[in-house]
């Protein structure tokens, strides 16, 4: 079955760190552009980061997370990561791992909730 | 690019048409391939978004044909031709023309049954 499964969310204090993981099944992760998108409770969708489908060296970030978050992948484990440092209250959200298809997002994981408490 | 949807919410009778509008702050038409870089998603409570429409009007595999997309330049529309109970959800438009940021989304339109 083609799917994405996120993990790693939880409750963390402001200033803390978390690493989110997204395991891909049924397709090869490195063949696709991959994204992280977040959704604060009761709010809309916000793009966070993207990694290209080549050697993974090209990455981009939303201004709100630049310098604090790092996207990466492990091709051997078919897994995407999001390392989140210096977390702030406004980083509280459900984080979705998304496969790029048709240049949009054709496959979404179920999401993992990150709660930052001060 | 800022994406603005209207209305914020919509109540439609079963079997009736639902129309959601999305306006981008600048053109998302890529002239080299004549494609408008717009997608539409459906999100039901407690679920992740689901891709419905890409390249403005191409329906994703498995999406019922009562869903259709149209528009060009800065103005786009998602139409549900005959609303079904399972269509109750929030709908988002998305542009993927401008980078960075890679993607920007509209604020969402909540569709309910009247």
Image (cartoon, rainbow, N blue to C red):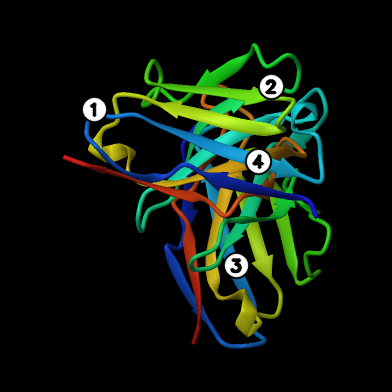
Residue B18 vs residue A3: left or right? left
Label 3: chain letter: B
Q: Quadrant of the N terminus of chain A?
A: bottom right
Spot occupied by residue A30 in the image (x, y as percentages of width and height): 76, 26
Element type at mark 1:
loop
Q: Are marks 2 and 1 in contact (CB under 8 Å)?
A: no
Q: Which mark is residue A15?
A: 1
Q: Which mark is residue A23?
A: 4
Spot occupied by residue B37 in the image (x, y as percentages of width and height): 69, 37
* Crowdedness near tag 2: few (<14), some (14–19) or many (≥20) residues, C-alpha within 10 Å: some
Label 4: chain letter: A
- Please give the residue where the numbered disc 3 appears in the rendered image: B19
Using the numbered discs, state the Cα–Cα distance from disc 1 to disc 4 in whole angstroms. 26 Å
Using the numbered discs, state the Cα–Cα distance from disc 2 to disc 3 in whole angstroms. 35 Å
Spot occupied by residue A115 in the image (x, y as percentages of width and height): 31, 46
Tell me: residue B6, above or below residue B96. below
């Amino acid at each position: 079955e083609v799917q994405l499964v996120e993990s790693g969310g939880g409750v963390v204090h402001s200033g803390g760190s978390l690493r989110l993981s997204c395991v891909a099944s049924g397709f090869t992760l490195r063949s696709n552009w991959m994204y992280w998108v977040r959704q604060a409770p009761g709010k809309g969708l916000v793009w966070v980061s993207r990694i290209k489908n080549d050697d993974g060296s090209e990455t981009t970030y939303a201004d709100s997370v630049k310098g604090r978050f790092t996207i990466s992948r492990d091709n051997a484990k078919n897994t995407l990561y999001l390392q989140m440092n210096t977390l702030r209250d406004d980083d509280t959200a459900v984080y979705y791992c998304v496969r790029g298809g048709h240049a949009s997002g054709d496959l979404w994981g179920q999401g993992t909730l990150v709660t930052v408490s001060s | 690019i800022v994406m603005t949807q209207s209305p914020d919410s919509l109540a439609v009778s079963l079997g009736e048409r639902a129309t959601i509008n999305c306006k981008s702050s600048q053109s998302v038409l890529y002239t080299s391939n004549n494609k408008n870089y717009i997608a539409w998603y459906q999100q039901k409570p407690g679920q992740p978004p689901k891709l419905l429409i890409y390249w403005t009007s191409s329906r994703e595999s498995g999406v019922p044909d009562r869903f259709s997309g149209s528009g060009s330049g800065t103005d786009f529309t998602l139409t549900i031709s005959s609303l079904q109970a399972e269509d109750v959800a929030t709908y988002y438009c998305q542009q993927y023309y401008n980078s960075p940021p890679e993607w920007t989304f509209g604020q969402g339109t909540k569709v309910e049954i009247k």
